[in-house]
Structures are given as structure tokens and as C-alpha cells.
């Protein structure tokens, strides 16, 4: 049995997230249709579930709902960090005003914190932002672009707190190389014995 996460419309016409355990994608879809759900869109399957298992995180509907609300651009991530960090700016501005009135000086560390906070949060968001770009490039079979984005994700993971799974990057690179017609190099890039992955996942390389 595997877990499949779908976005669907219920009988009231509202979009909801449903997690179904089934043997196949088709079976999970049939279960949802039998329950009266419409406008079904698969959001995660056993491949995604495997990736989350590698990071000791369970892919759940609640987690996916948060994932749907993520910013899609660097500017969006920057603005969200400012909005979410309102308490930092409230305390920082209050402290700055009080300190200036009492001592006649501006607290430099607090000012640096307020300025640096959105840049720090945006930097942490980069892996997710580039992964979105990666998936979009894959959907359009822009394989050269996929290779460039995968390379950037690899570099970002070296210096970012959020580490992107190297197994996933290898699989993506192999898909791109295969898409460009270089199947031997794709198979060399994605060696099952080196990655220690299950048979079912290894067969997804060209799908």
C-alpha cells in the first residue's frame, strides 16, 4: 500500500486535500470518485512519500496545505518574511525609539537584525523556490534548464540550512540527460547500487 495525496472538490464545491492509501494511483482515484469527489488532481504519490521518509518527515494533507500557500518567487518570499516578522519590527522599532530618546544613540545590532531578517528568511526559502522552477521546467521538457536549476540547487544546498536530497537531484539530472537523448550518461548518473533505493523508484527514471 502507498499513500496518495490529492486535491479534490467536495459536494459543496470546495477544494480540499485528501490522503488515500491504495495499491495504485488508479485505485486511489476510484475510491475518491466513488465517494463523490470531483476535479481530482494528484499532488503526491509513493515517490514523494519515499523522499519524505528519507528526511524523517511524513507527507500529510496538513503539511501539503502549508506547501500550497508557499511563495512562488523570491520577491514573494521576501515580502512574506517581512509580514511574518512583524513582531521583530515592532519590538525593534520600539527599542530603537526608546534607546534613542534615552541615550541619544541608535542600537546598531537591532537595526542590523531588522534589515537582515527578510534576507535571511528568503535565503532559507531558496531551495523550495528553485524546486518549483525545476518542476515547471520538467513539465515543459526544458531539459537544459532543468540541468542548470539542478546545479544551482546543489550549490545552494551546500550553504543553506535547508538541504535538498541529493538522491532526488541525481534522479532529476538523469531524467534531463535522458530527455536530451544521452541515455548512457543518464544511467551512469543514476546508479541504483550507489543510491541504495528500492526497485520501484529506480524504474521511474525515464517516466
Image (spheres, helix red, strand yellow):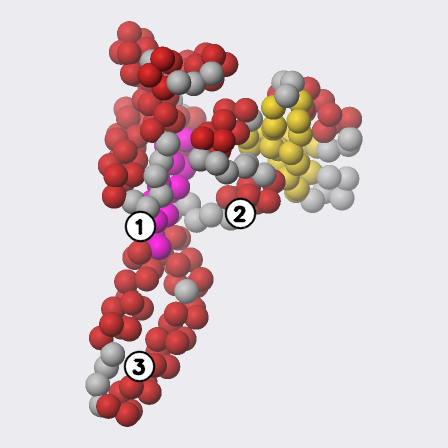
Quarter of image, res 63: top right
Could you say whether the residue bearing mark 3 is in a helix, strand or loop?
A: helix
Rendered image: mark on residue 66: 2
Residue 84 against residue 11 in the figure, above or below: below
Magenta span of residues: 121-135
Q: Does the magenta run of residues contain 123?
A: yes
Whether residue 178 is visible: no
Is 79 positioned to the left or the right of 37 in the image? left
- For residue 50, say whether it is visible: yes
Q: Which quarter of the figure is the N terminus placed in?
A: top right
Residue 48: assigned label: none
Q: Residue at x 28, y 11 (%)?
A: 188
Q: Which residue is mark 1?
A: 123
Relative to 108, say whether 157 is above or below. above
Which of the two labelled residues, at mark 3 and mark 2, occupies the earlier sequence position? 2
Q: Position of residue 138 (x, y in %)?
A: 39, 26
Residue that mark 3 sits on:
96
Q: In this view of the protein, which residue sits in the foreground, 154 or 32?
A: 154
Disc 2 to disc 1, how far (Cα)?
19 Å
- Camera-side residue: 140 or 181? 181
Amino acid at each position: 500500500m502507498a499513500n496518495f495525496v490529492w486535491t479534490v472538490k467536495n459536494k459543496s464545491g470546495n477544494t480540499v486535500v485528501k490522503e488515500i492509501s491504495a495499491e495504485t494511483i488508479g485505485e486511489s482515484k476510484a475510491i475518491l470518485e466513488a465517494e463523490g469527489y470531483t476535479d481530482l488532481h494528484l499532488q503526491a504519490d509513493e515517490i514523494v512519500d519515499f523522499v519524505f521518509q528519507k528526511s524523517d518527515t511524513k507527507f500529510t494533507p496538513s503539511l501539503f496545505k502549508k506547501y500550497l500557500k508557499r511563495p512562488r518567487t523570491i520577491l514573494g518570499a521576501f515580502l512574506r518574511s517581512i509580514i511574518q516578522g512583524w513582531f521583530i519590527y515592532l519590538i525593534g522599532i520600539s527599542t530603537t525609539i526608546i534607546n534613542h530618546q534615552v541615550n541619544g544613540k541608535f542600537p546598531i545590532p537591532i537595526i542590523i537584525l531588522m534589515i537582515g531578517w527578510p534576507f535571511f528568511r528568503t535565503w532559507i526559502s531558496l531551495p523550495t523556490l528553485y524546486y518549483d522552477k525545476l518542476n515547471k521546467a520538467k513539465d515543459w521538457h526544458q531539459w537544459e534548464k532543468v540541468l542548470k536549476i539542478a546545479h544551482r540547487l546543489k550549490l545552494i544546498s551546500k550553504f543553506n540550512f535547508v538541504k535538498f536530497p541529493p538522491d532526488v537531484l541525481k534522479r532529476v539530472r538523469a531524467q534531463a540527460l535522458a530527455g536530451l537523448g544521452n541515455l548512457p550518461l543518464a544511467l551512469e548518473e543514476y546508479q541504483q547500487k550507489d543510491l541504495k533505493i528500492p526497485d520501484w523508484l529506480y524504474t521511474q527514471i525515464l517516466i
